Amino acid sequence: MVIFGITACTRKPENQTVPENRVYVTAQPALAAEFVVPVRLSGILGTRQQMKLSFKTGGIIKQVYIQEGDNVKKGQTLVSLDLSEIKAQAKQASIGLEKASRDLKRAKNLYADSVATLEQYQDARSAYELARAQKQIADFNLSHSTIKAPADGKIQKVLVEANEMIAPGYPAIVFASSENDWVVRVAMTDKDVVRFSPGDSAIITMDAYPGDTLIAEIAELGVLADPVTGTYESELQILDPMPGFRTGFICRAWVFPKQTQKGVLVPMDALLDAKDNKAVVYIFINGKAEKRDVITGTVKEGDVLVTSGIAAGDSLIVSGAPYITGDANVVLKK
């Protein structure tokens, strides 16, 4: 009797039903979109033609005519050597050429009179050619014992002082030509460099000119990776330079590729388990929620560009998606 009484108390009424697992959601159509996604980079301002000027021969610095930051004109004298020794060498070569010329003339006349042999005449001629070459070398060294500006430009760095000894080919002046365009040198990753082409546009900002935005374009893309960083140094040419530009200004750049990213716009609230450009969304189809794996791209104003997994026009579940389970009865809110 006790067992029967317990069994009777636990029996369910035949008309009692199990509550349905309902999830109320909202949905909206996925919209097609096409974005130009810029790449943000940082770089250093410089000119396309920057060179280190040096002397052909060594010697003692006689005078430095300029200072760092000076604007100079083409042909203007920048630094000169003490020419005492070089002029003496040029005079020595000149005297040697005069003597060789007289010897050649005398040997030629003697050879014509059959007094000198052909060998003697040829030796005199060789001595003359040697003396003339030595004179050309001396004159060349003399002309390159003064550094002159190769073009209109600005002095970036002065590396010598008067009365210092300088070796042949050692840099004396760092010179930047203003006849060429100002560029921003940036380092691009391999993933970015393949997206761009010469002529793609860019926007430049600098701390030196707060509030100013400069328009630029890609002038050159790197073709050889830096062995340390693995990046490719590229140049962005500024189309309208500022008059106060100086080499070394820190720049920030937004570079816009001609290629665009196509996909559909998805509200950020509709994405689940987003990680590493992957996420999950639910699509409302025939009264049911269908789970989709998607590939995400750029984020813009609270929406995410989805490049794969759904198509424009799909009914995308926005709110309520986190509560959907495998046996859920999905109901659209009116």
Image (tube, grey):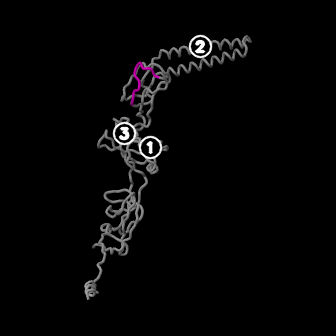
Residue 154: image location, x then y, percent: 39, 31
- Tag 2 residue: 98
Q: What crowding class fits label 3: few (fewer than 14 Cα within 10 Å), some (14-19), or many (20 or more)?
A: some
Specify whether residue 256 is in view. Answer: yes
Dot in front, 1 or 3: 1
Q: What secondary structure is marked by label 2?
A: helix
Residue 307: image location, x then y, percent: 41, 61
Residue type marked 2: Glu
Report the magenta residues as a range.
Answer: 155-166
**Label 1 – label 3 distance at C-alpha:** 29 Å
**Residue 248 located within the stretch drawn in magenta:** no
- Residue 278: give its label: none
Q: Residue at x 30, y 70 (%)?
A: 25
Q: Residue at x 37, y 75 (%)?
A: 286
Q: What secondary structure is marked by label 1?
A: loop
- Tag 3 residue: 241
Q: What crowding class fits label 2: few (fewer than 14 Cα within 10 Å), some (14-19), or many (20 or more)?
A: some
Classify residue 67 by image quadrant.
Answer: top left
Disc nearer the start of the sequence (2/1): 2
Residue 26 drawn above or below residue 129: below
Classify residue 97 by image quadrant.
Answer: top right
Disc nearer the start of the sequence (3/2): 2
Badge count: 3
